[in-house]
Image (cartoon, rainbow, N blue to C red):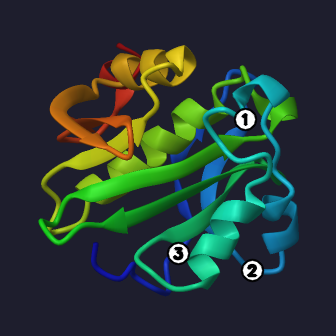
Amino acid sequence: MSSAATNIEVIDDDRFDRHGRRVSLRPLGDDWLAVADIAPHDNQREFVPALAARYLLVNARGGPWTSMGVYANEVVAGHIMWAQDDDLSYWIGGLVIDRAQQGMGVGRAAVELLTAWFAGRPDYAVTRLSYDPKNAVAASLYESLGFVSNGEWVDGEVVVERSGTLRGADARA
């Protein structure tokens, strides 16, 4: 994967969770510690790290990924990261929603926001991500958002992709 872009602005495009909170993606700044402390439920640790701090450490060591905080209004609700591959595909990775924020549609809104942002870039072709096939919650979310398997596997995870943006009724399909 190629280097992630720098100087990313806030990504905020009228996406809301089920409680009407505005969801946005923000570059890390003084909030980095709150993002690092994001923790999933214990039974999700098979699929994601115990704390989002692991993703921040990976990014701090260099590489292609750009980490962003996921916000619901002004509450740090999660972490998401993205990169662009050498084939110009955009990848979503490291999505972790804090256990206290789960089940409210924050993760769905974060994926919708990032995919719409990708689709607005001039070099956009496709969004890809991977997940453990045993993670039924992730499989259901990504399938509901129109992601389909492309037949590839990465590190034991199924790769799914979606071209186009997620908007309105299409995003809720």
Question: In the rendered structure, are the residues bearing label 3 and label 2 in contact, judged by CB atoms less than 8 Å apart?
Answer: no
Q: Please state which of the two labelled residues, at mark 1 or mark 2, is closer to the viewer.
A: 1
Q: Please state which of the two labelled residues, at mark 3 or mark 2, is closer to the viewer.
A: 2
**72 displayed left or right of 140:** right
At mark 1, the secondary structure is loop
**Snapshot quadrant of residue 19:** top right
Sequence-first disc among 3 and 2: 3
Sequence-first disc among 1 and 2: 2
Which residue matches tag 3? 9
Give, as a three-letter code, the residue at label 1.
Arg
**73 displayed left or right of 87:** right
Give, as a three-letter code, the residue at label 2.
Gly
- State the residue at coordinates (83%, 29%): 42
Q: CA distance from mark 1 to mark 2?
A: 26 Å
Where's residue 131, x and y in %? 44, 35
Mark number for residue 45?
A: 1
